[in-house]
Image: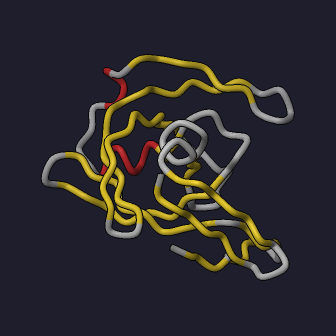
Amino acid sequence: MRFRYKKYAKLLRPVIPIKVKNGSRSVYYEVLVDSGADICIFDSEIGDLLNIDYRKGERKLVGGVAGQVAEYFLFPVEIEVGGHTYKITAGFLPNVAGGSNYGLVGQVGLFDKFVVKFDLLKEEIELKQR
């Protein structure tokens, strides 16, 4: 499946639409496909919308590019990508992308399920199911 890059603040980014699910609740969400992210991290607002008490999940710390450290909580959810549903464990973090309105999908949770091809010149990202 192929997705077009999206423009955010004049920058092209490999952002794709997914659906995040918890039981009978679901929410559509855009996520940055980030090869440098170890796991998937979603904004805590998504957890709230899905009625997830994510603060009862495993507490972890993440470091940013500028050295800042933030607390997040791991919680099991399902994601739907291109009509296919996968069980993953995601981190929930307030203001995950610095106000960019998207989450992150990374090595565990996306790259372990798909072969990912980035093509900036074509402004396209391709996901092939493993």
Q: Is residue 57 above or below residue 123?
A: above
Report whether 88 appears left or right of 13: left
Residue at far front of view: 130
Query: Which residue shows up at 44% across the image and 63% down it?
Result: 29
Q: Against 106, is 14 above or below?
A: below
Rendered position, 13 above or below 44? below
Q: Nearer the viewer, residue 46 or 113?
A: 113
Left/right placement of residue 126 relative to residue 25 reads right
State which quadrant residue 123 falls in.
Answer: bottom right
Type of colouring: secondary structure
Q: Where is residue 84 in the image (x, y as percent from the top left)?
A: 32, 61
Q: In which quarter of the image is residue 71?
A: top right
Residue drawn at point x = 32 percent, y = 42 percent = 87
Locate residue 19: give its quadrant. Answer: bottom left
Q: How many numbered tags mark residues here?
A: 0
Instruction: State the residue in front, 64 or 130.
Output: 130
Percent across and percent down for residue 21 are 27, 52
Task: Find the residue positioned furthest to the left.
Answer: 24
Residue in front for this viewpoint, 85 or 114: 114
Q: Please state the horizontal and vertical placement of residue 59, each as a whole percent of the image.
A: 47, 17
Residue 124 horizontal/vertical position (percent)? 69, 76
Q: Tell me what residue is drawn at x 32 percent, y 33 percent.
A: 76
